[in-house]
Every structure is written in structure tokens, then in C-alpha cells.
Image: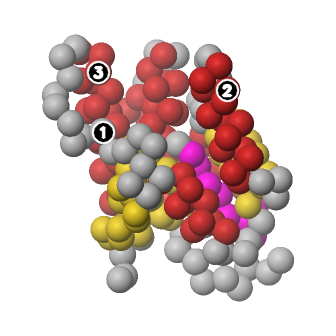
Amino acid sequence: MTSNHTTVPLRLVLGGANSGKSLFAETLVRQSERPRRYIATAQAWDDEMRAKIAAHQTQRGPDWTTVEAPLDLVSALLLAQPDEIVLLDCVTLWLTNLIIAEQDISRASKSLCVALTQATCPIVVVSNEVGQGITPDNAMARAFVKHQGNLNQALAAAALEVFFVTAGIPQKIKGTQ
């Protein structure tokens, strides 16, 4: 397939848990008619998460190249071909994985943002908006909200389009209307 498509290089899809953001992001990717690459960050720690991952795989269907990248998103992004479109789902789980693995969150977040802005193909990034609730009552949760908020702000600044999904309804909050 040739690269004569006019697509947005980076799009960000935000929303709460189970808001419909992944389904909307998949729709954006399907509209491009490019070969599809899915970068998965989820880890199946329990039966519920295994079922959720399986449901997402069924929802996407078989015509995706899937790369499992619970920690090293930069290397996974480097595998993408210029004629493809990438769906990165999701940076919130990736951030959780980094925290559990006691990685340097700031350094990893900066590396991810650089890789996304230097990508040779369009990318749709999915992330949870976690800053609309109350301030958490413990230090780890507050640190997570801080890191997620900072990362979302950096991603939104780099993206040409940003969408917010609520109850399955997407709203464009940045980009040409």
C-alpha cells in the first residue's frame, strides 16, 4: 500500500475507565485503510484481565499485527512501518507497569513523547483521564495521578487531534472541527 494517505500523525483519545475510548480509537484506525499495528500494554495478572484482553482481541478482529509491550513502548514503536497506522492502547496501563517495575517514570515518559513525535506513521494513543476525581488518600495513588496527568498533558501538546470519550460519545477537544 502506498503512503499517499492524508492522515494526522498523532491523535490522542482520552476517557475514563470503560468509557468507549478503545472502540473509538479502533474506529479511527480502521478509517485510514492502512495496515494496522496494535501495541498492547496490558498484562494479564488475573482472570478478569485475561477476559478483558480476550474481549479486546475479539473486538479488533484478526487483521491487526499485535505487539506486546508492557514496558518498552519505544522499541515497539520502532517496529512500525511507514505505511502502517498504530494503535497504542493504553499508556495508563503502561504507566502502571512502569510503577510496578520501579522504572524512572519521567525519563520513560519523555522517551515515549520523543518517539511519538518522530514516528514515521500515524499513531492513535489511548489514555485514561484520571484527574477528574477526588485527590487520592495515599501517596502512591497521588503520584500515579500526577504522572498520568503530566503524561496526558505532554501527549495532548504533541497531538494534532485530541478526543475525549464519555459514555461512548467522542468529543473532539483539539484539532480542526
Q: Which residue is mark 2?
A: 50
Depth check, front residue: 60 or 78: 60
Name the spot of residue 28 as percent of width and height, x first.
57, 68
Q: Which residue is mark 1?
A: 130
Name the spot of residue 12 as percent of width and height, x first.
44, 59
Q: Taking 54 as reference, is 79 above or below it? A: below
Label 3 or label 2, whichever comes before in sequence order: 2
Name the spot of residue 120 as percent of width and height, x first.
64, 65
User: The residue under label 1 is which amino acid type?
Assistant: Val
Relative side of 136 to 71, left or right: left
Label 3 or label 1, whichever comes before in sequence order: 1
Q: Taking 59 as reference, is 25 above or below it? A: below
User: The residue under label 2 is which amino acid type?
Assistant: Arg
Q: Which residue is mark 3?
A: 141
Label 1, label 2: how far apart the Cα atoms are:
23 Å
Relative side of 171 to 51, left or right: left
Q: Taking 172 as reference, is 15 above or below it? A: above
Label 1 or label 2, whichever comes before in sequence order: 2
Is 88 magenta? The answer is yes
Mark whose residue sits in front, 3 or 2: 2
Name the quadrant of the N terminus: bottom right
User: The residue under label 3 is which amino acid type?
Assistant: Ala
Name the quadrant of the C terminus: bottom left
Label 3, label 2: how far apart the Cα atoms are:
24 Å
Which quadrant would residue 87 be assigned to in this image? bottom right
Q: Taking 118 as reference, is 72 above or below it? A: above
Is 39 magenta? The answer is no
Whether residue 121 is visible: no
Image: magenta residue range: 80-89
Mark whose residue sits in front, 1 or 2: 2
Whether residue 42 is visible: yes
Badge 1 element: loop
